[in-house]
Image (cartoon, grey):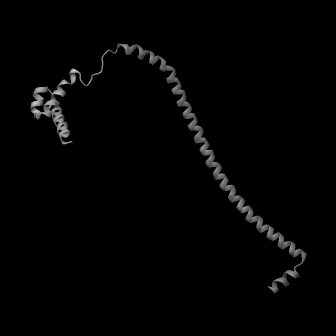
Amino acid sequence: MELLNQYFAILSITQWFMLSVAVVLVISLFSLKRQRKIQQEQSISMQMLQRDLRALANAAVGVGGRVLEIERQQRKRPAIVQVHEQIQPQATQAPIGIYSPVNQPYEQAIRMAQTGATVEEIVQACGLSKSEAELVTMMHRLDKAS
């Protein structure tokens, strides 16, 4: 330690100046290297942001096109509604209810299945297909089981 103190004591002012310039130069080089690294990272970040901005702009254009198409369809819609209103009164056929005559063979088949009739008996009496009669009897068995 004493040797270092003696060495620093004999340094001239010029040598001190040169030593301080060297230290400042080394610090500046490290700072410059760090600044370049930060600049590269910012450049990469900027490129990513530009790419994302382009993608958003393209998406906005696509959405705008879809909105225009929907607006065109909405303008056409009143004409479609008018045609529908003209046609609707002409539809006079009522929906088929549960107890309508169309469902009578099924009701009879259910009653027969509940009394224990076979699939063949249900087919002959109600005019159902064999598959329909089997379904009715299966459902009846499920009702008995539960």
Q: Residue at x 18, y 36 (%)?
A: 140
Please identify the quadrant where the C terminus is shown.
Answer: top left
Q: Nearer the viewer, residue 89 or 143?
A: 143
Q: In which quadrant of the rendered view does residue 3 lie?
A: bottom right
Where, by quadrant of the figure, is residue 109 drawn? Answer: top left
Name the residue furthest bottom. Answer: 2
- Residue 14 in the image: x percent, y percent? 89, 74
Front residue of this view, candidates 32 and 98: 98
Q: Residue at x 51, y 27 (%)?
A: 70
| Image side of residue 84 versus residue 72, left or right | left
Decide if residue 111 is on the left or right side of residue 50: left
Nearest the viewer among 86 and 99 is: 99
**Residue drawn at 19 percent across, 24 percent down:** 104
**Rendering coords of residue 145 (x, y %):** 18, 42
**Where residue 107 sits in the image (x, y, percent)?**
18, 27
Q: Quadrant of the N terminus?
A: bottom right
| Number of disc labels | 0
Residue 4 coordinates in the image, percent (x, y) = 81, 83
| Residue in the picture at 41% in, 17% down | 84
| Above or below, 30 relative to 5 | above
In front: 8, or 127?
127
User: Taking 70 as reference, is 14 above or below it?
Assistant: below
110 relative to 146, above or below = above
